[in-house]
Amino acid sequence: MPKVKTSKEEVLKKVIPILRSRGVQNSSMSELSKACGIQKSHFYYYFSNKEDLIREVLATVHSYFNYNLFKIIESNALSLNEKVLKMKLLLDKLFRASDGGCIMANTALETIHLDPTYKKEIQSFFKDFILGLQQLLEVHHSTEKALLLAEQMVQDIEGGILLTQIYDDPKYINNAMKRTETAILNL
């Protein structure tokens, strides 16, 4: 018999890796509730439908990313080198250490042409990702140049994640991260 008690946070924690690797379309509510060890009816207690669940997942990932990224970037106790190292560890945890790559990019690729339901949350995530990198780049570049470089970095990192998934070879994301580090540190 499945567990009856579990928190919404525990459910999201279990659902995120499944959605990251299987995608929105290939994950049913029955399957997700089973993976969480709860009855489907209990699952619907937290999420009225699949769209509600996906919105909550994307908002949770975005919030976690923002909190951790900007905590690093805005720290006065860290040098620029330390900030880059900690940022790389965060990106590694989110994008490389888990199957499936970037849940935001995956969800965008899978859903945006069919249903723009999640578009604003995904746009907001990438806007914040760019803003964070821009702030680091402004140490050595003008605001305009930093923005351009930050946009290129996010494109490079996301492309690296995609190619790493396609070829099952981490060299693509590793190379994108090296280029990002070099640009931020102005090496």
Image: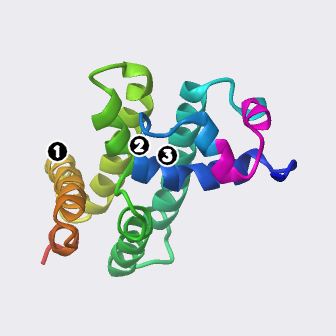
Q: Mark 1 or mark 2, which is nearer the start of the sequence? A: 2
Q: Is residue 119 above or below residue 13?
A: above
Q: What amino acid is labelled 1 in the image?
A: Glu
Residue 9 lies, in percent from the top left, at: 71, 50
Residue of label 3:
62
Q: Mark 2 or mark 3, which is nearer the start of the sequence? A: 2
Q: Which residues are magenta?
A: 33-44
Residue of label 2:
23
Residue of label 1:
144
Identify the residue at image location x=34%, y=29%.
111
In the image shown, does 129 or 12 lie closer to the viewer? 12
- Asked whether residue 172 appears in the rendered view, the answer is yes
Residue 105 lies, in percent from the top left, at: 32, 44
Closest to the camera, between mark 2 and mark 1, is 2
Q: Decide: few, some or many residues near mark 2? Use Cα within 10 Å; few <14, some 14-19, many ≥20.
A: some
The CA distance from mark 3 to mark 2 is 17 Å
